[in-house]
Image (cartoon, coloured by chain):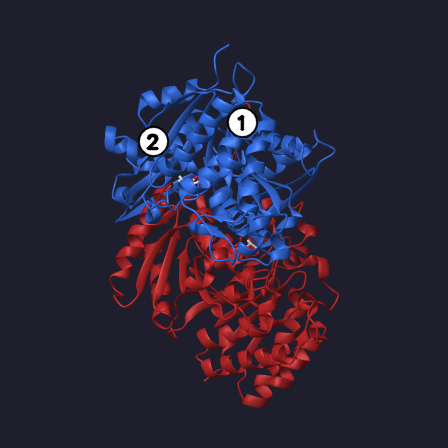
Chain colours: A red, B blue
Amino acid sequence: MSNPSLLILPGDGIGPEVMAEVRRIIAWFGEKRGITFDVSEDLVGGAAYDAHGTPLHDDTMAKAQSVDAVLLGAVGGPKYDGLDFSVKPERGLLRLRKEMDLFANLRPAQCFDALADFSSLKRDVVAGLDIMIVRELTSGIYFGEPRGIIEEGNERVGINTQRYTESEIDRVARSAFELAMKRGKKVCSMEKANVMESGILWREVVTEVGKDYPEVELSHMYADAGAMQLVRWPKQFDVIVTDNLFGDLLSDAAAMLTGSLGMLPSASLGAPMENGRPKALYEPVHGSAPDIAGQAKANPIACVLSFAMALRYSFDLGAEAERVEAAVNKVLGDGARTADLLGEEGVTPVSTSGMGDAILAAL
Amino acid sequence: MSNPSLLILPGDGIGPEVMAEVRRIIAWFGEKRGITFDVSEDLVGGAAYDAHGTPLHDDTMAKAQSVDAVLLGAVGGPKYDGLDFSVKPERGLLRLRKEMDLFANLRPAQCFDALADFSSLKRDVVAGLDIMIVRELTSGIYFGEPRGIIEEGNERVGINTQRYTESEIDRVARSAFELAMKRGKKVCSMEKANVMESGILWREVVTEVGKDYPEVELSHMYADAGAMQLVRWPKQFDVIVTDNLFGDLLSDAAAMLTGSLGMLPSASLGAPMENGRPKALYEPVHGSAPDIAGQAKANPIACVLSFAMALRYSFDLGAEAERVEAAVNKVLGDGARTADLLGEEGVTPVSTSGMGDAILAAL
Ligand SMILES: CC(C)[C@H](C(=O)O)[C@@H](O)C(=O)O
Ligand SMILES: CC(C)[C@H](C(=O)O)[C@@H](O)C(=O)O
């Protein structure tokens, strides 16, 4: 049997820096655990634009379609701000999501015990927090047509279209309920059914899917109330399921609650491939952080934990994923902190690779 | 000269309860300050639906167009959940906003000193917070066509359209810059220009308007990053300007930061009328809170402060507005707390009318 295959797309800004630490962990798995991946690497985002004039080369797209999992760093940066919309770094990422049909974006918002005081929220509001946001990732206003900037009368009009089909809602809702079954058995669905017809359909379909999961408690919340409740008392939630655009805002707010933005991984999953595992792309929730790129300041943990998610969801190596997560927890408990996490007493500042060293030692 | 006119629309749930306290304050102004309003009252939302089968009667709409200002309580409730989209309570409010062309929704997120410990955020993150969110209110995905639920192939598709014209963006941006000139001289504009063409146009037009306000420091942020930054360090902001849908979520999150949801007013302003003052509707940020309606638990302060905003923006009575705001501050400092604000030591629980009594006494 051939080794599982992994395509690494470091991307821009701190992407390559955090990915370098993940590569060391991948190497460790080969040496110490006899788990070897066929790793290939390629360009995405601004880096791909610089090389090929496009944020995702067709060859890279084809590679992504053929591997067992893709691991992505981050895309974007001020250098590319002036580029035309069609070749912006983000388009590379969006093309991957769309063409791989990665409809379920799993974004855990977890508060690491050692970091509970680091949040802008009070300790008791966030300590022990563990929620999972399931964001629809291949449809909605991100991809709907018509779109663009048109001339009308004497002025320009900016247009985007939110479009959701029943089956698009159905499949992401199922992902959310399946996850809830393995967790706290609660799903909260968020939309604006009081204002948007697409939200009405969303609510109806999620309610229908919920009937197949009688053990799961389903609730509905308007997305604005959801944003409020996330800030007020996030522990009321277990799994949240929402659309592409609301998911973008709500998952970022939730990530920030934990005080651990540089810590949070994500998985974007599609339909099962021939081997039964879903098409998958893993990436940290944080961005390319151009302001600290190249300074050995970046926190590699989100990217390391994204690799752990890959172990769990793409390679059926849940125990190995836990090994990585435990190592990260130990390192944090021991007080190792990258620049984004400084501020408390009694901690040890480390560089990006210093954090990598510590995780490897803990493994 | 005739008295200034005010149309009161108490609406649903706790709306009538909080409005009753505002009426006492309006009466106080007549008796003690010789400032008399021509007050009329009418139905909106579920209450209007119950009486007329529509959430806003045409006569009420006509009245709203003719008065100097409208003061609204809240709309909606579970009783109306099953209603057809076209007659839901919210449609009454949306029709008022649209037909009065109230394009600039001003939502201050202020933390009251006496309540700083009440927030789920740490005291130093929110104490003294004073930001103003300017939300576009008459366009975007709330009103864009095409919209609806259509059949396509074998399934239904939910569709909504985000549409922004240059002039729609221009006028709300101007409102934001004008406000910033009277405040901290900073505007942060939020959109998703990395994903949505309407966001690209938004950023371009706001940048253009900014050139007319060289004293104001303009920055741009993606709305997801904005949601994060609001949670991380909200004091970095002065005025935030954003579209209808992002504004809905971001202003609710910002309101919750302050721990003072039951305290926050809003003003929705349109173009100047013949008398030079803007068309205007004032309403609390909180909703109709059906769970506590009829129990004398509701906090009337948001509605009282909405009336204060009316004094300032519609009636040129800035000093009287400050009188009301000072009375509210005093009452809070003295420890009066409605049910939503209980939990601290040494405070005095009061009912809705008890809070009204205290404010009147402080006036
Ligand atoms: C980079 C950008 C296109 C992307 C998005 O908006 O989806 C990012 O914010 C995210 O959440 O992954
Ligand atoms: C009641 C509802 C239609 C409304 C909105 O979505 O605008 C409310 O959430 C608000 O923010 O005023």
Which is more toward the observer, A295 or A257? Answer: A257
Is B299 situated left or right of B173 in this image?
Answer: left
Which chain does tag 2 point to?
A: B
Residue extending farthest to the top is B1
Compared to residue A52, the image places residue B245 above or below, namely above
Residue in view at x 36 percent, y 41 percent: B14
Q: Is residue A42 among what the camera can see?
A: no
Which is more toward the observer, A176 or A51? Answer: A176
Q: Which residue is mark 2?
A: B44
Q: Position of residue B224 (x, y in %)?
A: 55, 52
Which is more toward the observer, A272 or A187? Answer: A187
Which chain does tag 1 point to?
A: B
Secondary structure of the residue carrying tag 2 is: loop
- Mark 1: give few (<14), some (14-19) or many (20+) Cα within 10 Å: some
Is B263 situated left or right of A53 in this image?
Answer: left
Distance from mark 2 CB to nearest ligand 2 atom below 8 Å: no
Q: Position of residue B174 (x, y in %)?
A: 61, 30
- Mark 2 to mark 1: distance in Å? 22 Å
Q: Which residue is mark 1?
A: B311
Is A238 situated left or right of B321 in this image?
Answer: left
Compared to residue A125, the image places residue B132 above or below, namely above
Residue in view at x 54 percent, y 59 percent: A58
Query: Ligand 2: which quarter?
Result: top left
